[in-house]
Every structure is written in C-alpha cells, then in structure tokens.
Image (cartoon, grey):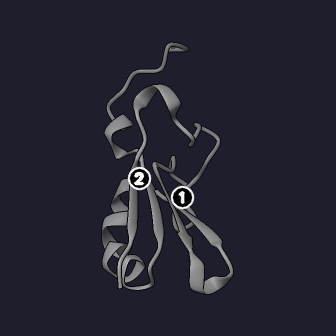
Amino acid sequence: MTATTVDVPTTTATLTRQDRCDRCGAQAYVKATIPTADGMELLFCGHHFRAHELKLVAAGATVVDERHRIDERSSED
C-alpha cells in the first residue's frame, strides 16, 4: 500500500487555529483522508499523528502534513 503525503508551504496553510485534533482537542497540524472509509477526514496534533502514522499509511491515507508550522508565531500574537 502507498500513502500520499502533501507538505503544504507555510503561505498556503490549509489548517487553521480552529482545527482541532480528533483525539485530544489540541491544534491540528495534520489532516488524513482515508479512501477506504469513503474519504473520511481525520485531524491530528503532531503527537497523535506520530502515534497513528503507520496505520494511516497502511490504510492508504492521503496526508496533509503542516507540522513544520508548529513553532511559527502568529501575526495576531
């Protein structure tokens, strides 16, 4: 099985501060779309994505990974 990982440049972030990890409620930096579940989308913080990454890859998930943004400061701060 193969998974598609999409690294999104910082200037075109698709996840916002309002997007929350489906496991713990922290800010989500990863979106995984699982084709075998009719395109179900799951959102993960960095920690929970690492915990589930192998299973997502095995399921053929398409992953949008924005973890490179974790240390960015918002212009709103």
Q: Which residue is mark 1?
A: 21
Disc 2 marks which residue?
6
Task: Label 1, secondary structure: give it.
Answer: loop
Q: Amino acid at mark 1?
A: Cys
Residue 12 at x, y percent in the picture: 51, 31
Q: In terms of depth relative to the viewer, which is nearer, 72 or 36?
A: 36
| Mark 2 closeness class: few <14, some 14–19, many ≥20 residues within 10 Å | few
Residue at position x 51%, y 46% from top? Answer: 27
Q: Residue at x 61, y 47 (%)?
A: 19
Please tell me how many numbered marks the rendered image carries: 2
Would residue 34 be found to the left or right of residue 63 on screen?
Answer: right
| Residue under the image location 57 percent in, 41 percent down | 14
Quick check: 64 above or below 58?
above
Residue type for callout 2: Val
Q: Where is residue 25, by image quadrant?
A: bottom right
Disc 1 crowd, CA 10 A, few/some/many (<14, 14-19, 20+): many
Quarter of the image holding residue 1? bottom left
Residue drawn where x is 51% and y is 50% of the image: 28
